[in-house]
Amino acid sequence: MDTPSRGYAEGSENAEWPFGDSFRSHGDLAAHLHQVGRRHARRALKLYTSMDEFEMLDAAFSVGSAVELLAKSLLASVSPTLLLSATPDVGSILKFSGATAPGFNRPDAVTVKSLDAGKSIERLKQLKMAPPWLPADNAVFWVRNGSAHMGVVDQNTLRSAVRPMVRFAEFVRRHYGRPADRWWGAELDELAHGIARAEVEQSEEIVHAKIAAAKLRLRELRESLPASSAETILKAMSGRSRTFIEHDEDQKCPACGYTGKAIGVILEYGIDADHYDGGVTYYSRMGVTHFECSVCDLELTDELEVMAAGLPTEIDYVDEDYEPEPWPE
């Protein structure tokens, strides 16, 4: 990711996005979003442990702003049009596409409608350009909104929100190939690395404990069954789940080895197709958010635990219900 240009004067053909008393070009949008998002990430790390209430407010605002702007930087690096909201107006379409229309005044960059923060994460997931993002991670936006709209901040919630912010920022940093000490700065690099590592270690510890308990349950269950039929009974118990979100697929249990269920949300329909005489087989993609085993009762409840257990976080599957939209006549 290149550093954005120093700026253009008002009236220049490159003056698209205002930044202080100058403007940045449309081609600089992704780099601009990255630069400002990185500044917010560093500011949040600097201030989130402060005992000064106003510095905590600043940190809260920066926690959510960092994730939103860095997410939008990734989208803009593919195409600025990916920043359009679901129901864009004509001015926003022209602004994000970099297009002009005769007789239509140049849209004001301050009033264009862009994708909201949560939708930016969802769109990145569709593009396979996002790290694991849990429902609870949206607290980074709640914390930001509380500080921005009501001037309120809770110390414990703020400190909890820093972990997903660092996880997301580290993903963006690696995506752009930036050295950690230069991205965070020498003083904050070690802190960011420690926060990221602590989150991974916490998930690994929880998963190791869950797997150990599941193995113990399996042994106790096997001992309670007739030796001659135990294996038949255990196999009959496998492959069931109590939870259903949008889709599930069979997956080998990392604790007992029997068939469990990977459960999750559908990220994309009709990603591929196999054509053969008499028909077509379509494939869709599921994002795995849970795993359950009905034999040993192992339950993994979020993407971080699924990853820590060595299970895939995305699965392509045969979608027997998918039918492509007909071509317009």
Image (cartoon, rainbow, N blue to C red):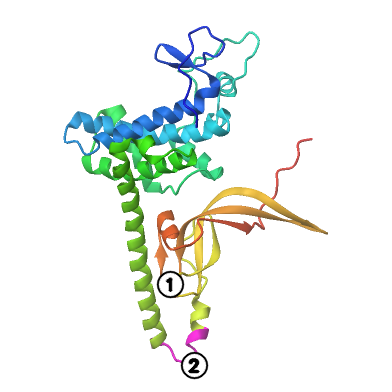
Which callout, 1 or 2, points to the residue nearer the camera? Answer: 1
Identify the residue shown where x is 38% and y is 70%: 211
Circle 1 SS class: loop
Tell me: residue 191, above or below residue 12: below
Calculate the distance from the C-alpha at mark 1 to the C-alpha at mark 2: 23 Å
Q: Is residue 209 left or right of residue 237?
A: left
Give x and y (percent) for residue 298. 41, 69
**Quarter where residue 100 is shown:** top right
Eyeballing the image, is 233 above or below 196? Answer: below
**Residue 33's quadrant in the figure?**
top left
Crowding at dot 2, Cα within 10 Å, few <14 / some 14-19 / many 20+, comes out as few
**Residue that label 2 marks:** 228
The numbered mark at residue 255 is 1
In depth, the one of 1 and 56 nearer the eye is: 1
Residue 174 shown in magenta: no
Q: Which residues are magenta?
A: 224-232
Q: Position of residue 325 (x, y in %)?
A: 70, 43
Disc 2 marks a residue whose amino acid type is Ser
